[in-house]
């Protein structure tokens, strides 16, 4: 690598002393997230660690000239489901490193629901050869709704304790508050996490009641990434519940949370950033944690505070600040050089002491991955499945039916229950395009059972056709939404042929698809191919099927979620308040 290529100068005066820095970043201003200050200094690195901050000019094997820019710690995502990016860790690092993201606090909840403990271990092993640091938030509820859904894998207390005892585990993964209220076994999992001095991540969607928040905090839930308003965030913060400010593909809470907090709090130590679920197209278009930092600064937050929220705050919170989060001797050399603290244009990224990105160029590639057969063959449909199995049937041949309708909220995972009258023909309840009320079904795909949950949904605005996904939280059975049974059936069958993914069908023809062969959740292909397929697929859903949603498949992934108000749909049926309810309330001939 020559200086003209990437601007890196190799020193020809290599010292024989073992302590000679392997990398020096010169002519930069250090953003000190410990004190909240800025000072001029060189950063000396030996192998994978920061070893010195000094103005002395020492020889080094490699020198990066910061050219008066600012050196900040690598960004940390406080809560992410890697699976939702559709990319394996090696490819995900290729898309995150240019955005300065060097550490992920990842909850492998999705892979666990499909493949259990061995799926988590495979994902962790894959992350070791990636250029991003991955800590694990041990999945706490696999399945999320026991008895109400079918999953491919399960994690009991034994498996959870095994994982919590490993050095890569930083917390017990997101624990839905309904589980805590209904089953003491989940409280015991929090206690196990406490014994290992690990955090316990909360999932408190929609909770505003002070008494309930007091109880959840007392139980040991220490954070939440579901706050959608400043008021929700504030009520958590004053109870010592850390808030992960989320900005994903379909859940965008940053503006609503931070704008309202600016005049209510003075200390931001318990505030951090997370993406939760973000598709690679959105990462490429707007960024990742760097986007959250820029957006916070645009809203008027002090740049140093915004950077602390993305670096030292999560490092301290997860008790790994001895490893990462600051530019201090002894910490891992995860460093980002930016041109200004407001725009955060990223010039150089160092991960684990290695220059991995410089002036618009990635300086590494991802290795080729071969998956074991058990991680690929995960979509098993019952051979007896018929297209009419995807529709609601009634006790009358003709007439109308009063049904429960799941109304989605674009950009959020929250759902609302509506009651609507729909037409019945030949014993089947029909969709209503004029009111945007469409069929939705969840088809079991782990064990080959003939389980199909059926209901209606409002908000997808398809004018024809169907879309289907093998990614559907948290059970990850096949979710399909459509205008008629035939297109829905074709979409479901196609997913079994490609080992899972996303597919769109119109008038009996497949108009777009993405194979996600790793557990039906992720692709092992290069991210460029996945992004191209996803862009083409979303365009087809808009132009051919007529949907107006910016992320129709991300929205579809969450319709089935039984743990978020007010309705969820699983392969066992429609779920309300953790009980199966009838989708048809009344019929009239």
Image: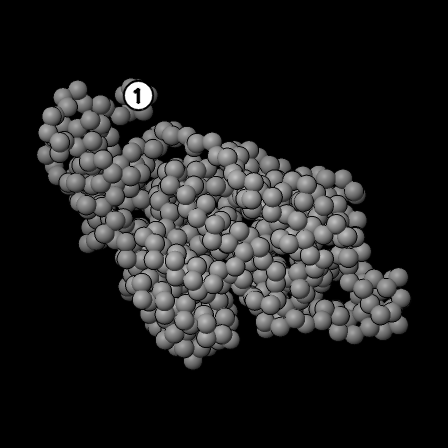
Residue 335 location, quadrant: top left
**Image location of residue 191, percent across then percent down:** 36, 70
Residue 403 relative to residue 197: left or right: right
**Image location of residue 79, percent across then percent down:** 41, 55
Residue 392 relative to residue 410: left or right: right
Callout 1: 10 Å neighbours few (<14), some, many (20+)?
A: few
**Image location of residue 399, percent across then percent down:** 87, 68
Which residue is at 60% across, 47% downward?
Answer: 378
Which residue is nearer to you in this view: 383 or 132? 383
Residue, disc 1: 1
**Image location of residue 512, percent across then percent down:** 67, 39
Q: Quadrant of the C terminus?
A: bottom right
Q: Quadrant of the N terminus?
A: top left
Q: Secondary structure at mark 1?
A: loop
Note whether 333 is above or below 224 in the view shown.
above
Would residue 486 be seen by someone viewing this image from the given angle?
yes
Q: How is the image coloured?
A: one colour
Would residue 415 be seen by someone viewing this image from the given angle?
no
Note whether 90 is above or below 480 in the view shown.
above
Which residue ends up furthest to the bottom in the rendered image? 211
Note whether 95 is above or below 454 in the view shown.
above
Note whether 284 is above or below 179 in the view shown.
above
Which residue is at 61% across, 40% downward?
Answer: 515
Residue 516 location, quadrant: top right
Q: How many marks?
A: 1
Which residue is at 89% across, 66% downward?
Answer: 397
Which residue is at 66% across, 64% downward?
Answer: 572
Which residue is nearer to you in this view: 309 or 495? 495
């Amino acid at each position: 690598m020559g200086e003209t290529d990437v601007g890196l100068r190799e020193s020809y005066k290599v010292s024989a002393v073992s302590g000679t820095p392997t990398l020096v970043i010169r002519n930069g201003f250090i953003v000190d997230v410990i004190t909240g200050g800025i000072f001029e200094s060189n950063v000396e690195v030996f192998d994978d660690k920061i070893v010195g901050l000094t103005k002395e000019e020492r020889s080094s094997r490699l020198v990066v000239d910061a050219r008066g820019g600012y050196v900040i710690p690598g960004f940390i995502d406080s809560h992410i489901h890697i699976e939702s990016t559709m990319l394996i860790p090696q490819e995900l690092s290729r898309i995150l490193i240019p955005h300065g993201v060097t550490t992920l606090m990842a909850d492998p909840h999705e892979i666990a629901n499909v493949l259990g403990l061995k799926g988590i271990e495979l994902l962790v092993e894959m992350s070791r050869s990636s250029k991003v640091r991955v800590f694990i938030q041990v999945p706490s509820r696999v399945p999320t709704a026991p008895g109400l859904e079918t999953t491919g894998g399960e994690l009991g207390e034994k498996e959870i304790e095994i994982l919590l005892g490993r050095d890569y585990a930083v917390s017990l993964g997101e624990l839905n508050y309904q589980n805590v209220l209904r089953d003491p076994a989940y409280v015991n999992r929090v206690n196990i996490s406490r014994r290992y001095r690990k955090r316990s991540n909360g999932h408190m969607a929609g909770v505003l009641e002070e008494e309930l928040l007091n109880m959840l905090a007392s139980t040991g839930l220490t954070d939440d990434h579901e706050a959608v308003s400043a008021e929700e965030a504030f009520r958590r913060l004053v109870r010592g519940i850390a808030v992960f400010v989320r900005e994903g593909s379909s859940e965008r809470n940053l503006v609503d949370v931070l704008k309202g907090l600016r005049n209510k709090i003075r200390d931001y130590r318990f505030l951090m950033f997370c993406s939760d679920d973000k598709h690679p197209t959105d990462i490429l278009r707007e960024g990742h944690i760097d986007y959250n930092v820029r957006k916070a600064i645009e809203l008027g937050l002090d740049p140093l505070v915004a950077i602390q929220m993305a670096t030292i705050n999560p490092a301290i919170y997860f008790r790994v600040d001895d490893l990462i989060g600051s530019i201090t001797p002894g910490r891992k050399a995860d460093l980002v050089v930016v041109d200004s603290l407001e725009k955060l244009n990223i010039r150089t990224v160092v991960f684990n002491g290695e220059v991995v990105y410089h002036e618009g160029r990635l300086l590494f590639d991802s290795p080729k991955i071969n998956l074991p057969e058990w991680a690929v063959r995960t979509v098993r449909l019952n051979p007896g499945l018929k297209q009419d199995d995807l529709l609601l049937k009634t006790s009358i041949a003709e007439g109308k039916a009063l049904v429960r309708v799941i109304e989605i909220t674009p950009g959020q995972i929250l759902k609302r229950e509506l009651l609507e009258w729909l037409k019945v023909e030949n014993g089947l309840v029909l969709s209503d395009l004029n009111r945007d009320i469409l069929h939705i079904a969840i088809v079991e795909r782990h064990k080959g059972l003939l389980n199909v949950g059926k209901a209606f949904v409002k908000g997808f605005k398809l004018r024809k056709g169907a879309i289907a996904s093998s990614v559907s939280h948290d059970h990850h059975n096949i979710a399909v939404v459509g205008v008629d049974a035939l297109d829905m059936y074709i979409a479901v069958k196609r997913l079994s042929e490609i080992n899972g993914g996303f597919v769109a069908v119109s008038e009996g023809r497949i108009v777009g698809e993405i194979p996600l062969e790793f557990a039906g959740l992720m692709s092992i292909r290069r991210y460029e191919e996945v992004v191209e397929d996803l862009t083409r697929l979303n365009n087809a859903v808009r132009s051919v099927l007529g949907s107006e949603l910016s992320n129709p498949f991300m929205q579809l992934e969450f319709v089935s979620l039984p743990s978020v108000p007010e309705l969820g749909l699983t392969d066992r049926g429609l779920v309300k308040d953790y009980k199966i309810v009838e989708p048809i309330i009344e019929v009239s001939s």
